[in-house]
Image (tube, helix red, strand yellow):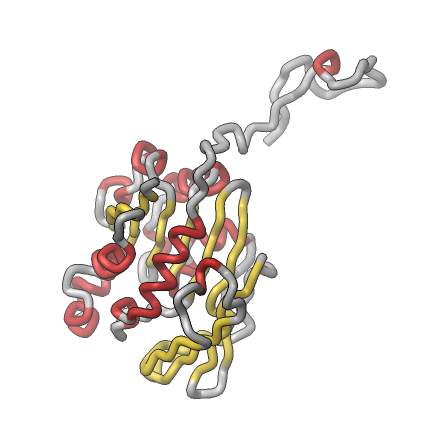
Amino acid sequence: MTIRAVVWNEFIHEQNNDTVKDIYPDGIHSEIARAIADDEISVETATLQEDEHGLPQSRLDETDVLLWWGHKAHGDVSDHVVDRIQQRVAEGMGLIILHSGHFSKIFKRMMGTPCSLRWREAGERERLWVINPSHPITQGLGKTIELPHSEMYGEPFLVPEPMETLFVSWYEGGEVFRSGLTYQRGAGRIFYFSPGHETYPIYKDPAIQTVLRNAVRWAYNPAKPWKDVSEAPNVPYDKAPEPLEPKGASLHKRGEAGYR
C-alpha cells in the first residue's frame, strides 16, 4: 500500500520575506514533503502559482491525502479548484489543514462557519497537550509537544464541534486553543492542526513531523472513491423497494432532475 499525498502551499512568504526564506529556502511545502515521505507515503507538491494551482482534476483524482498551507492569498485561490477539492473530500480524499489554513476557502466551506480565532505574534512558548494518547495521530508522542517559539492562536475558535479534539495548546501569555481537531465530510476525513507559523522552524520539529505523518495515514481512505456522493436522483415510484402507487400532485415529471 502506498498513500499518495500532495502538499499544497501558496509559496509567497518564502519568496518575499527573508526570515521565512532563511528557515524554508525550498518552501514550506518542500519541508513538509521531506518530513512525511517514507516507504508507505509518496509525496508530491503543488503551489498557488502553478496552472490550476497545481491541482487539476486529473491530479486530485490520483491524490489520497491533500495537505494545505495558506496564509496571505486565500482569496487568490480559484473557486473552481475549491469545488474540485470539496468533491474529492466527499468522495473519500483526506484533507489536512495546517495553521493559518483555518481561513482558507476550502476549510471554511467544509466547516460552514467563520473559522475565526484570536492571535498574537510574540514568539511565545506553546505547549500542546495530547488529549487522546490512544488515537492514531498521537502515536509516538509524549504527553506534550513543547515549541519554544510560536504564534498564539486563542479561543473562541469558531468551528463546528469536532469528532475528536486531539490537542489543546497552552501559550506563554495564558491563552488556550483547540489545536488538533478531526472531522468527517462525506467519505473524507479532515484534520486541522494549528502549529506552523512561518517565521519559526516548527515544521522541522521531530514531534510535529510525527503528527503530520500519522495524520496522513489516519486520513487515508483505502475504499474506492464514492463518485456519486453528490448526486440526488429522482427515484421513480415503480423503482421503490416496496409496491407503491403515486398519490397527489407532483412538481416533477418522471426522471426529471430536482432543483439545486
Query: Considering the image in quadrants, where does the C terminus appear?
Result: top right
The residue lying at 61 percent from left, 21 percent from top is 257
Question: Above or below — where is 248 with respect to 34?
Answer: above
Question: Above or below — where is 17 with respect to 240?
Answer: below
- The residue nearer to you, when weighing 201 against 129, is 129
The residue lying at 46 percent from left, 58 percent from top is 136
Q: Position of residue 45 (x, y in %)?
A: 24, 49
Q: Quadrant of residue 142?
A: bottom left
- The residue nearer to you, when weighing 226 against 73, is 226
The residue lying at 25 percent from left, 55 percent from top is 33
Q: Is residue 119 visible?
A: no
Q: Quadrant of residue 30?
A: bottom left
- The residue nearer to you, when weighing 224 against 90, is 224
Q: Position of residue 154 (x, y in %)?
A: 49, 76
Question: Above or below — where is 129 with respect to 162?
Answer: below
Query: Considering the image in quadrants, where does the N terminus appear?
Result: top left
Q: Position of residue 189 (x, y in %)?
A: 49, 49
Q: Quadrant of residue 210?
A: bottom left
Count of marks, rendered view: 0
The residue lying at 51 percent from left, 79 percent from top is 176
Q: Position of residue 207 (x, y in %)?
A: 34, 70
Q: Residue furthest bottom?
A: 173
Q: Is residue 209 visible?
A: yes
